[in-house]
Image (spheres, rainbow, N blue to C red):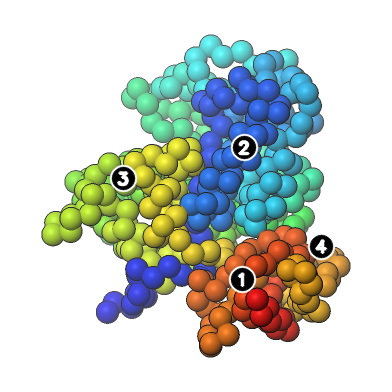
Amino acid sequence: MAAGLCAAASENPKREFRGAWMHTIGQSQYKEQTTEQNQAYLRKQLDQLLAAGVNVVIWQVRPSADAFYPSDLEPWSKYLTDGGQPPVPYWDPLQFMIDEAHARGMELHAWLNPYRVTTTKGEKLPKNHLYHKHPERFVKYEGDGKMYFDPALSENRQFIADVVKDIVTRYDVDGIHMDDYFYPYPAGGKDFPDSKSYAKYGKGMNKADWRRQNVDQLIELVHKTIRARKPWVRFGISPFGIWRNKSTDPRGSDTNGLQNYDDLYADVLLWAEKGWIDYLVPQLYWELEHKRASYLVLVDWWAKAVDPKCQVYIGQSVEKTMELPDLAPSKEPNQLKHKVDLTRQWESIQGNCWWPAYSLTRDSKGSATALKNSYQATPALVPAYTGISNDKPKAVKKVRLKDNILSWSVVENKGKATDQVKFVVYRFDDASDRNFENPANIMAVTTDHSLEVSLPGTYVVTALDRVNNESSPSNEVRKKN
């Protein structure tokens, strides 16, 4: 067996990142629905994701230099209201999603696009948009007709970092997330229009290296911004699935497609090596044996390529995974089992993230049912980020049972990584061996300090801190009937 491989790939692990990307860009339902309807809709989405075993929701709160939350820096999102106006009746969608996700024992990661400003040609920006004050800080890319922040300008990097600071300071988010859009995807044979900035700031550097340096500086600044405010908040990136092809770089993968490093100017391996990001979710949306970008090849490559202090999860396309049969001699009607098993074979891969969340919530091609019944049938704790903190939270004390209500004492939180923020309730049959590593023994993951229980057995509670370190077990409580 190769180094770094795990033996029991098919077993559902106790620790696994099980994310889902819930995008808002291009989604009309939020604007069409009333506040009450939106809240009911989002509650249902979260309930359906939780039932499918999802433990992390990555929700797009800044799709296009706008906000799904009240901001003094940017207007309300055009996907929520018209003209940058606040919603009526008023509500704060980000705070709502944090509260609802946490109430279900799930994490909420705030997803931001850093540079994109418009999504269509000729789009008019709200009067309170930064563009109207400083049009010189923006460029229009003829390739796709969209407007972007100029990544070369330090004031733009600081502005984006200020947006992150605002979110992290005001909201109890578990993570800040950026996807694959840095410099835009090449389009129409046009080069990105940054010749003036390059002439002013390039200082003789190779232009591609200079562009990468611009993005590097943004990532480092965002990292430092988060660490200075709430060091337990994780910073994650979900890059395009190919870093570089082997034909370009001997360190690259045996693929033949667009390259993060060369086309989007995102050197994600460097960011992992420098410790600027906490996790990577490469988007491996292709089938198992895609001719130019094989999932089989790329899972192995990412498992080996990323600095071990950065966690790796695999971005999975729900539709692509469910629409194609598994490879012969398997008779599986889809590639779900094969793909999940491949990720679980590697110690360096600690989970999956499903794209898009809406495909799971409508159970496209039976995807959510399969996860619920098989591959995510038992609860999973989000992997601990020991690189941020490896200190355990205090153990839960005074667990007691009265009238079928299990309850425990609360420790006052002090705004530290080791704060008790979630609780894991275990139930063991009287004849069991108290196996805390078996996820089938987990009854619930909750932010509450009590839980109604009906089954007989022995109950034990542990605490999870802000980076998912788990405490020592509490005292045991037995329920006889």
Cα separation, mark 3 vs mark 1, equals: 36 Å
Q: State the SS at label 3.
A: helix
Q: Residues within 10 Å of mark 2 (few under 14, many from 20)?
A: some
Mark sitting earlier along the chain (3/4)? 3
**Looking at the image, is 290 positioned above or below residue 224?**
above
Mark sitting earlier along the chain (3/1)? 3
Who's the residue at 65% across and 49% down the image? Answer: 101
Q: Which residue is mark 2?
A: 42
Who's the residue at 74% across and 23% down the image? Answer: 87
Q: Which mark is residue 415?
A: 4
Q: Residue furthest front?
A: 481
Q: Residues within 10 Å of mark 4 (few under 14, many from 20)?
A: few
Left/right placement of residue 140 relative to residue 390 reads left
Name the residue type under label 2. Leu
Mark 1, mark 2: which one is toward the viewer?
Answer: 1
Q: Are marks 3 and 1 in contact (CB under 8 Å)?
A: no
Who's the residue at 38% across and 66% down the image? Answer: 344
Q: State the SS at label 1.
A: loop
Q: Which residue is mark 3?
A: 322
Q: State the SS at label 4.
A: loop
Mark sitting earlier along the chain (1/4)? 4
Mark 1, mark 4: which one is toward the viewer?
Answer: 1
Residue situated in front as seen by the camera: 369 or 323: 369
Cα separation, mark 2 vs mark 4, equals: 28 Å
Cα separation, mark 1 vs mark 4, equals: 36 Å
Q: Which residue is mark 1?
A: 455
